[in-house]
């Protein structure tokens, strides 16, 4: 499971060093260092390869008569790219994904359970501020949807 966040810097070739705890998750998932990256919510999302395969299978159940679902499927899967982590724990972010997420030099990797996200640092901090500002409403939404969180 991906947890926490880490600040990183993209190198001139668009490579990024994953935090050690993220590397452990990738290798413990039997994905042989392979990841699938795609575009979502203004960031780049990374899945261990085997997790991605399960996600793809879940799309077999989608009603493709629904135009919005077809559009989302097209957007999500057409942006996907397999990458392999090198011995230094680096991955190469494809140019189309760097452009989509507006990644400059300073980025944040955020663990979000079965996946991680790569954000431009300024955009990540803006997202966190929005959540902090709307915290009570979000907690109400969670409660309304049946989540019992004991904090």
Image: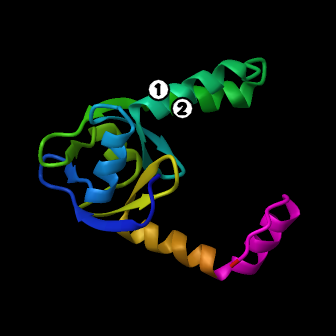
Q: What stretch is highlighted in magenta?
A: 133-150
The image quarter containing residue 86 is top left
39 over 32 or under it: above or below: below
- Residue 60: x percent and y percent? 66, 18
* Residue drawn at the location 19% of the way across and 48% of the way down: 89
Sort mark 1 into few (<14), some (14-19) or many (20+) by Cα contacts within 10 Å.
Answer: few
Horizontal arrangement in the rendering, residue 150 relative to residue 24 (left or right): right
Does the CB distance between marks 1 and 2 fall below 8 Å?
yes
Q: Label the magenta part by its dominant secondary structure.
A: helix
Would residue 19 be seen by someone viewing this image from the given angle?
A: no
Taking 96 as reference, is 50 left or right? right
Left or right: residue 34 versus residue 92 is: right
Percent coordinates x, y for residue 87 in the rendering: 12, 42
Residue 121 visible somewhere in the drawing: yes
The numbered dot on residue 113 is none
Residue situated in front as seen by the camera: 79 or 102? 79
Kindly indicate the quadrant of the structure image that contains residue 6.
bottom left
> Is 139 contained in the magenta span?
yes
Q: Name the residue under label 2.
A: 75
Q: Name the residue under label 1.
A: 78
- Between 102 and 57, the one lying in front of the other is 57
- Please tell me whether residue 145 belongs to the stretch shown in magenta: yes
Nearest the eye: 19 or 10: 19
Q: In this view, does 147 lie above or below 74?
A: below
The quarter in which the C terminus is drawn is bottom right
């Amino acid at each position: 499971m991906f947890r926490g966040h880490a600040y990183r810097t993209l190198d001139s070739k668009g490579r990024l060093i994953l935090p050690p705890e993220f590397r452990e998750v990738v290798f413990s998932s039997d994905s042989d260092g392979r990841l699938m990256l795609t575009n979502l919510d203004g960031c780049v999302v990374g899945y261990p390869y085997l997790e991605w395969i399960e996600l793809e299978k879940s799309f077999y159940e989608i009603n493709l008569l629904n135009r919005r679902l077809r559009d989302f499927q097209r957007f999500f899967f057409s942006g996907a790219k397999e990458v392999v982590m090198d011995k230094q724990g680096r991955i190469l972010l494809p140019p189309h994904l760097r452009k989509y997420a507006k990644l400059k030099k300073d980025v944040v990797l955020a663990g979000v359970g079965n996946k991680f996200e790569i954000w431009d640092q300024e955009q990540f901090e803006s997202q966190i501020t929005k959540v902090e500002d709307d915290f009570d409403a979000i907690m109400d939404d969670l409660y309304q949807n049946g989540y019992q969180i004991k904090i």
